[in-house]
Amino acid sequence: MAVTFQLLDELAQTLAAREAEGLLRRRRVVDSPQGPRLAVDGCEQLHFGSNDYLGLANHPRLIAAVKDGADRYGVGTGASHLISGHCAAHEAVERELAEWAAPCAPASALLFSTGYMANLSVVSALVGRDDAVFGDKLNHACLNDAALLSRAEFVRYPHADAAHLERRLQASKARRKLICTDAVFSMDGDLAPLPTLLELADAHGAWLLVDDAHGFGVLGQGRGALAHYGLASERIIYMGTLGKAAGVAGAFVCAHPTVIETLVQTARPYIFTTAAPALLACALRASLAIIRDEPARRTRLAGLIQRWRSVSASLPWRQLPSETAIQPLILGQNAEALRVSQALWERGIWVPAIRPPTVPRGSARLRITLSAAHTDDHIDALAAAIRAIAAE
């Protein structure tokens, strides 16, 4: 028992140290559907912290599709995809996603419960000992964890520095090489130099894994970052998440059919996980139809991004040069980010403060995210509130 209490004391001390550094996080409780205004912690807040970029998370067509799916398939799938959990709805949305994302021809797609699991599956299935993974230093944590768990050599290159990456590829003696990158970097909002990365993959016989969590549904007429750049290759493994612009949950990997079959046969996070509810696949088919057929949502979002860039230009804190729905405002120190976030909260506006280790030390920020569901007045209200806080 003494050992147990000592271990608890160590955890408590670590938590106290995190709190002293302004790094302790807490969950707020939302009691309403996603939207520009949320009921949260007992009050209403104008919200700028969601990845629901197209405003689909509470769309009536998706809700109806979930109800129909529950009537047809029930709630749980009961088993993994390879046992008895793979339903007709899963199969149908995989076909549609493969046709829509199309990183090469032909292409197949595979559903996953989360983007984290999807990236773990791809990296661990394609590389291992005697291989090497090359990752941008600002990649999402799941790509870093996947590289570490694969047991391949993990080489991290400076953010978007293709010249540095080329030197590391040239020097590598690895049997297999995998370049992995976010397409849209989740905390900065900028795009990876995907055309150059594909050229390097071609030149050095490497795979290119593109995590398009924040581009799918938004960029490239909704097809994602590859379509935005006009890229296609059998070297590309494309991962898109389905809980952001698509408004539902889960993720998919799209690649050459041989790659997808390799994942089905060898990717442990896929093989040993109960399949996600089929009712979600039904909702995803409805979401994909809206993404295909309603480009006005993307046009609206693009207009809001430009409006924010315009009205926020005079703010005293540094903005990053993002043209995506992710609009970071760099405040620097943890305490300052927390102070401004709390001051906004008290004015009825919720913008989460992002701090290390999610972002590098000294770059704590407000991660402002915009949605097609916002209005011009919402954008103006946010800018006015931040300007007032800066003047205090």
Image: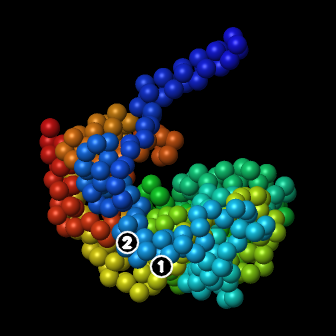
Name which of mark 1 and mark 2 comes first in the sequence.
2
User: Circle 2: is it few (<14), some (14-19), or many (20+) Cα within 10 Å?
Assistant: some
Q: Quadrant of residue 275?
A: bottom right
Asked whether disc 1 touches disc 2, contact meaning CB atoms under 8 Å apart, the reply is yes
Q: Which quadrant would the N terminus be assigned to in this image?
A: top right
Residue position for label 1: 286
Q: Quadrant of residue 38?
A: bottom left
How far from the left and from the top, in percent, is residue 291? 44, 80
Q: Tell me if 228 is positioned left or right of 197 in this view.
A: left
Q: Residue at x 38, y 42 (%)?
A: 28
Q: Residue at x 15, y 53 (%)?
A: 384
- Which kind of residue does numbered mark 1 sit on? Ala
Q: Which mark is residue 108?
A: none
Residue in front for this viewpoint, 8 or 33 = 33
How far from the left and from the top, in percent, is residue 193? 53, 70
Residue position for label 2: 59
Q: In the picture shown, does residue 316 fall above or below 87? A: above
